[in-house]
């Protein structure tokens, strides 16, 4: 921390200084902070270095310090396009399109492979007695508008995504989730849906930012958004790429 940053979080409360050699405590916006051991400087261990103004600016850039809100992995155009096309309906849904790569290869629909995996899935669910629960999840998501029945004739790129159960007995709320396999391929030389889409930046809040921000206020409120990733709708032109049996 440099001196200017320290001034921003320092309070007017006097420091607590102990005996010689003991730590010194300063009251900051983050609480009591130990800033010195209270001992003399050992000049025999000092090293001398030289730098210039440009090097200093480079070290203090916001992105170097991890404070700049920006997309990762050089996907600025993907992030910008995502922000531009993100809209919110009157019902409260956020809606966006799929981030297709501009030069992605031809994507086979994987219809036969999806049906084959559905047959194996049905057999597995019957053995584990999860068929009823699995069906209830699909029916609930359909009733809540998370998924819809697909029309027979697609209007855009068509792809069928296989799915499978993910069971966590230790989970407090959702013990069974349906996981969709967007890395599936129609044949070994075919691309997957994931390979045809840009990954884009992570959209979750960074835990460090949340923890630091909470220290500036006396009361913290926490909430949980139910099925957060299912609350974003896909534009109709791209929905046929998210079909499943």
Image (cartoon, rainbow, N blue to C red):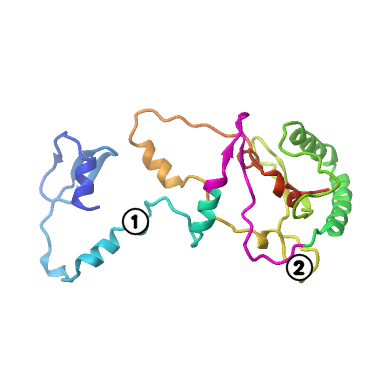
Look at mark 1 in the image and give the residue it sits on: 65
The answer to whether residue 224 is visible is yes
Q: Is residue 85 magenta?
A: yes
Left or right: 21 as drawn, with respect to 172 = left
Give SS at disc 2: loop
**Sequence-earlier tag: 2 or 1:** 1
Q: Residues within 10 Å of mark 1 (few under 14, many from 20)?
A: few
Look at mark 2 in the image and give the residue it sits on: 190
Position in image of residue 185 (x %, y %): 77, 63
How far is mark 2 from mark 1, CA to CA?
A: 41 Å
The answer to whether residue 36 is visible is no
Write down the quadrant of residue 145 in the picture.
top right
Left or right: 138 as drawn, with respect to 28 = right
Left or right: 66 as drawn, with respect to 113 = left
Q: Nearer the viewer, residue 124 or 64?
A: 64
Relative height, residue 14 to residue 241 (above, below) = above
Identify the residue at the far front of this view. Answer: 155
Give SS at disc 1: helix
Q: Is residue 72 magenta?
A: no
Q: Nearer the viewer, mark 2 or mark 1?
A: 2
Left or right: 37 as drawn, with respect to 132 = left
Relative height, residue 202 to residue 218 (above, below) = below
Please provide the residue range marked out in magenta: 83-107
């Amino acid at each position: 921390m440099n001196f200017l940053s320290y001034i921003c979080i320092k309070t007017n409360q006097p420091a607590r200084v102990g005996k010689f050699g003991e730590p010194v405590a300063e009251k900051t916006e983050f609480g009591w902070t130990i800033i010195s051991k209270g001992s003399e400087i050992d000049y025999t261990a000092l090293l001398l270095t030289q730098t210039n103004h440009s090097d200093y600016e480079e070290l203090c850039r916001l992105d170097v310090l991890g404070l700049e809100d920006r997309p990762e992995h050089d996907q600025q155009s993907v992030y910008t396009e995502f922000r531009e096309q993100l809209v919110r309906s009157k019902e409260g849904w956020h809606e966006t399109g799929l981030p297709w790569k501009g030069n992605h290869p031809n994507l086979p629909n994987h219809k036969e492979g999806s049906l084959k995996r559905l047959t194996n899935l049905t057999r597995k669910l019957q053995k584990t007695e999860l068929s009823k629960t699995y069906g209830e999840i699909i029916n609930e998501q359909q009733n809540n508008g998370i998924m819809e029945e697909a029309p027979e004739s697609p209007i855009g790129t068509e792809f069928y995504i296989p799915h499978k159960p993910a069971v966590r007995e230790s989970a407090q709320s959702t013990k069974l989730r349906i996981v969709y396999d967007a890395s599936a391929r129609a044949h070994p030389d075919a691309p997957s849906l994931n390979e045809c889409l840009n990954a884009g930046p992570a959209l979750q809040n960074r835990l460090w930012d949340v923890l630091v921000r909470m220290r500036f206020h006396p009361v913290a409120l926490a909430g949980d958004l139910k099925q957060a990733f299912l609350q974003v709708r896909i534009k109709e032109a791209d929905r046929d790429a998210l079909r499943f049996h």
